[in-house]
Image: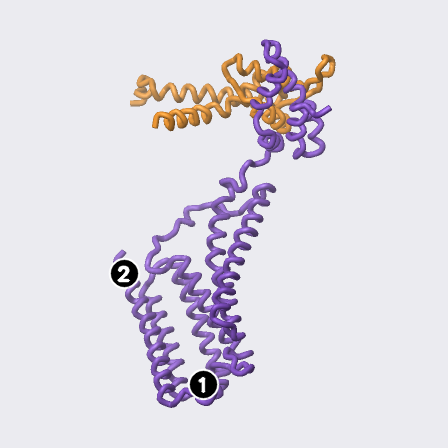
Amino acid sequence: MPATLTERYISATVRSLRPDAQEDVRAELAASIADAVEARTEQGEEPAAAEREVLTGLGDPAVLAAGYADRPLHLLGPRYYLTWKRLLILLLWIVPACALVGVGLSQALSGAEVGTIIGESIATALTAAVHVVFWTTLVFVVLERTGADAGEAWTVDDLPEPKESGTARTDLVASLVFLGLVLAALAWDRLIGLVRVEGDWLPVLHPGLWPLWTLLLVAIVLAEMVHAIVLHARGRWSTGLAMASTVLALLFTGWALTLFANDLLLSPDLLELARTVGGIDAQSMHTLGVILVVSILAVAAWDVVDGWVKTHRDRRR
Amino acid sequence: MVWRMNEAVDTHLQELRRGTVVLACLQLLREPGYGYALLERLGEHGLPTDANTLYPLLRRLEKQGFLTSEWNTEESRPRKFYSTSAAGIRLAETLQQEWRALTESLSSLTEPDTAHEES
């Protein structure tokens, strides 16, 4: 004999309940449904139609079971949603960007084609984004169901300062990612070499820079990081911050130009290879040198002007 | 637009009624009763409640200690009888008091006499 609708309904309801509660709910629900069907048949309804009506009135068994088990009918409730969203946005700003640049860099260093470099980095960044979303969400869904505390109670101190002029979190993240990559490139250049010529790794920077000049550059980069963090924390530019930005830009320009003028910036082996293997003549080399110097000056000038313009703008707010 | 308005009205009514089911159950179950009979009595008293809201609610209140339960197997159909515990009676009194206070407060909003007493 096939199971009746009521039996199927009750089984569907109790299936997901804790084993020790199942029998009790089953018996109670059976009695309640029988009572309701009986009340309808006493009014002259067909038993089959009455059963259908009663079960329809009770609604989706999964919803009823969630009610019995006190389970949420949502993935993430208001208790965790905002924490989840904030964390997810922060991670999505950082992780895929790092994956993109990291993979792109390592592909470029191992001499891959441009198409491969672009394809691989984008694919890796997308995969990283999907992983970030999935695992972050999974953790919060578990929190939602175990009722653990997200530990993020709001206070008035959390109110954001009015932020403009590039002091937003995205700027901080971008700065830190960029500066981190500079440090990584420095280390890579020192340990392995950034350029691959005819199967050999060659450093780009002059070997004579280590340790004093390299460490000086590391110090400048670390100072830039601290500057970015302080700027974000303050939420606005100030004369002191603009001054610090100017000093750092001048330090870097001084560092690069002093070394360049004394032929100490770039590795002589590399320049030699460019001449012999690359076939770049003295005239072109000179032009490239000018372009490099102008770029360094332009970046420094931009840094200085940017800081002071934003300081001026923030002061008027 | 009218349809949307009606929907909004329904939502507000539902929200106003939401907590009253608990109070009604605690009051009615001062005399032991079982699920379906309670559903009927709520309806008779003008507090129609969905079966799929009431049945889980009864178990939750039992788990929280405001109701006690007992299986009655004397009749042909075994039924689970609930009755309000001592803690449940205290909760009912608290809720009832709150309900009265709310009624008074809300009435005072539309009765200018009481509002002018202070001035």
Which chain appears purple?
A
Q: Chain of mark 1?
A: A
* Element at label 1: loop
* Element at label 2: helix
Distance in Å between CA atoms under marks 2 and 1: 48 Å
The three-letter code of the residue at mark 2 reads Arg
Q: Chain of mark 2?
A: A
Q: Is residue A68 visible?
A: yes
Q: Is residue A144 above or below residue B37?
A: below
Q: Pick whichever, B108 or A140, lies toward us.
A: A140
Residue that carries the numbered disc 2 in the rendered image:
A313
**Left-right relation of A70 to A174:** right
The picture places residue B92, in percent across and down from the top left corner, at 55, 21
The picture places residue A302, in percent across and down from the top left corner, at 32, 70
Which of discs 2 and 1 lies nearer the camera? The answer is 1
**Left-right relation of B60 to B98:** right
Residue that carries the numbered disc 1 in the rendered image:
A278
Q: How many numbered tags mark residues here?
A: 2
Q: Pick whichever, A11 or A232, lies toward us.
A: A11
The three-letter code of the residue at mark 1 reads Gly
Q: Residues within 10 Å of mark 2 (few under 14, many from 20)?
A: some
**Left-right relation of A48 to A159:** right
Q: Pick whichever, B76 or A80, lies toward us.
A: B76
Indicate the quadrant containing the N terminus of chain B: top left, top right, bottom left or bottom right. top left
The picture places residue B50, in percent across and down from the top left corner, at 54, 22
Task: Identify the residue at horizontal 43%, vertical 70% (top origin).
Answer: A223
The picture places residue B80, in percent across and down from the top left corner, at 68, 20
Task: Identify the residue at horizontal 48%, vertical 60% (top origin).
Answer: A94
Q: Pick whichever, A77 or A121, lies toward us.
A: A121
Which chain appears orange?
B
